[in-house]
Image (cartoon, grey):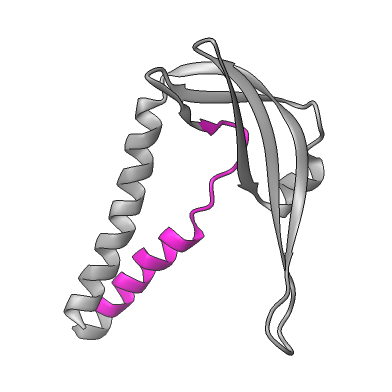
Amino acid sequence: MWVAGFGLLAVGAIRVLLRVFEKKRCTARAEGRVTSTEQDYNSGAAGEHETTTHFAKYEYWAEGKHVTGRERIPGRQYRRMTTGQRLTILYQPSNPKRHYVAEIKERWFITLLFIVGGVLFLIAAI
């Protein structure tokens, strides 16, 4: 139980640290725009619910290069996003393809599950 608890906590912490360090390297800023939004429908196995995943496609210019991207977005944000909408892109000057979109909310659910699961395993081991 201890091993599982510490393992889950470690995975959660590593996920947080990787994202934080990735964002710290994105020091340059560019203005981008939404080129389209799309939905992917994933039908579950027999009797399961269908799930929908939402994406925004966007483009921007950085360091003299045209860069395009596709990012998963929450459904609520998908319904408010429009083609042509301006976005703030933060990118790494040495590699403009390494970036994130300031307006798109991050999805922390899986990371939170690792951390909470680790804590619960450690509590159960006591």
Location of residue 5 by image quarter: bottom left
What residue appears at the point 52 percent right and 17 percent down from the top-left corner? 29
Q: Is residue 74 above or below residue 29?
A: below
The front one of 42 and 104 is 42
Q: Which residues are magenta?
A: 100-122
Location of residue 23 by image quarter: top left
Q: Taking 16 as reference, is 48 left or right? A: right
What residue appears at the point 62 percent right and 33 percent down from the top-left corner? 103
How far across and down, in percent of the image, does residue 54 sit? 71, 52
Secondary structure character of the magenta stretch overall: helix
Q: Taking 45 as reference, is 83 left or right? A: right
Direction bottom: furthest residue: 47
What residue appears at the point 38 percent right and 42 percent down from the top-left corner? 19
What residue appears at the point 30 percent right and 45 percent down from the top-left corner? 17
Q: Is residue 112 above or below residue 66?
A: below
Asked whether residue 114 is drawn in magenta, I would say yes
Direction top: furthest residue: 64
How far across and down, in percent of the image, does residue 97 sit? 48, 29
How far across and down, in percent of the image, does residue 57 sit? 69, 37
Location of residue 2 by image quarter: bottom left
Q: Is residue 73 above or below residue 66?
A: below
Asked whether residue 57 is drawn in magenta, I would say no
How far across and down, in percent of the image, does residue 38 sit? 76, 48
- The quarter in which the N terminus is drawn is bottom left
Q: Is residue 59 above or below residue 49?
A: above
- The quarter in which the C terminus is drawn is bottom left
